[in-house]
Amino acid sequence: MGQSEQPCLRLAGGTELRPWRASDADALVAAARDADIQHWNRLGHLTAEEARARIGRWGAYWRDESAAIWAIVVAGANVDADVPLGLIGLGDVSLADGTAEFLYWLLPAARGRGLAVAALSEVTRWALDELGLHRLQLTHSTANAASCRVAERAGFALEGTLRSALLHADGWHDEHLHARVHGDV
């Protein structure tokens, strides 16, 4: 992390994880309009200008070693190539403590194809093996069954339930806590 460039990570099938670009603002605006993404994430409603500013902050977070946020894109020559289908990232990164917490979402057209599991698995591998973190965790509402399946399929053990831990638009939600630690299989 820090001064070096954020790496691009490759997944099977021509999908890659790359840093967000200012030109991706429309995809971020579309995500902010999606009801499911709004329900489970604190994305807020964004204008194109606000989206570009947020993308700029993500680059600053990489440089100050506090977060790593990637766009999930399909590389190729077709019209939809290199347009973000989703987001995967590590927030609350502490290199000193060896910890970070995941965040992710997919636009509707990308759901149900295994992209979230593949992206989560690859960033987990990178964070544990290349970055040298020790513990990665993710939380999600107990009502968000899709996120629970993604966590489990990517090898994140369910460690417990955090009671009334996150305020969503429809009220306080209990959260599942999943984690992977270095050395887990």
Image: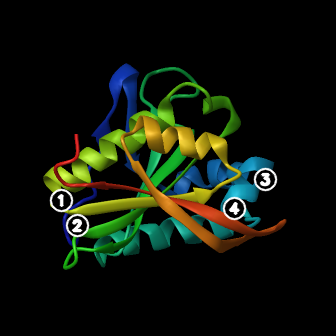
The residue indicated by pointer 2 is 1
Neighbours of disc 3 within 10 Å: few (<14), some (14-19), many (20+) = some
Q: Amino acid type of disc 4?
A: Ala
Q: Which mark is residue 131?
A: 1
- Choose mark 3 or mark 1, whichever is in front: 1
What amino acid type is highlighted by mark number 1?
Leu
Image side of residue 177 versus residue 134, left or right: right
Q: Residue at x 71, y 51 (%)?
A: 143
How many other residues sit within 10 Å of disc 4, few (<14), some (14-19) or many (≥20)? some
Q: Nearer the viewer, residue 31 or 95?
A: 95
Q: Which residue is mark 4?
A: 48
Element marked by disc 3: helix
Q: Earlier in the sequence, mark 4 or mark 2?
A: 2
Image coordinates of residue 178 in percent, x first then y, are 44, 55
Q: Residue at x 74, y 65 (%)?
A: 47
Q: Nearer the viewer, mark 4 or mark 2?
A: 2
> Pointer 3 and pointer 1: residues touching (CB < 8 Å)?
no
Nearer the observer, 17 or 50 = 17
Residue 5 appearing in the image:
yes
- CA distance separating discs 1 and 4: 32 Å
The amino acid type of the residue labelled 3 equals: Arg
Report the number of discs. 4
Q: Residue at x 69, y 57 (%)?
A: 40
Looking at the rendered structure, the kind of residue marked 2 is: Met
Instruction: Choose the circle earlier in sequence order: 3 or 1.
Output: 3
For disc 3, the marked residue is: 33
Residue 21, position as x, y percentages in the image:
47, 55
Q: CA distance from mark 3 to mark 1?
A: 33 Å
Name the secondary structure under disc 4: helix
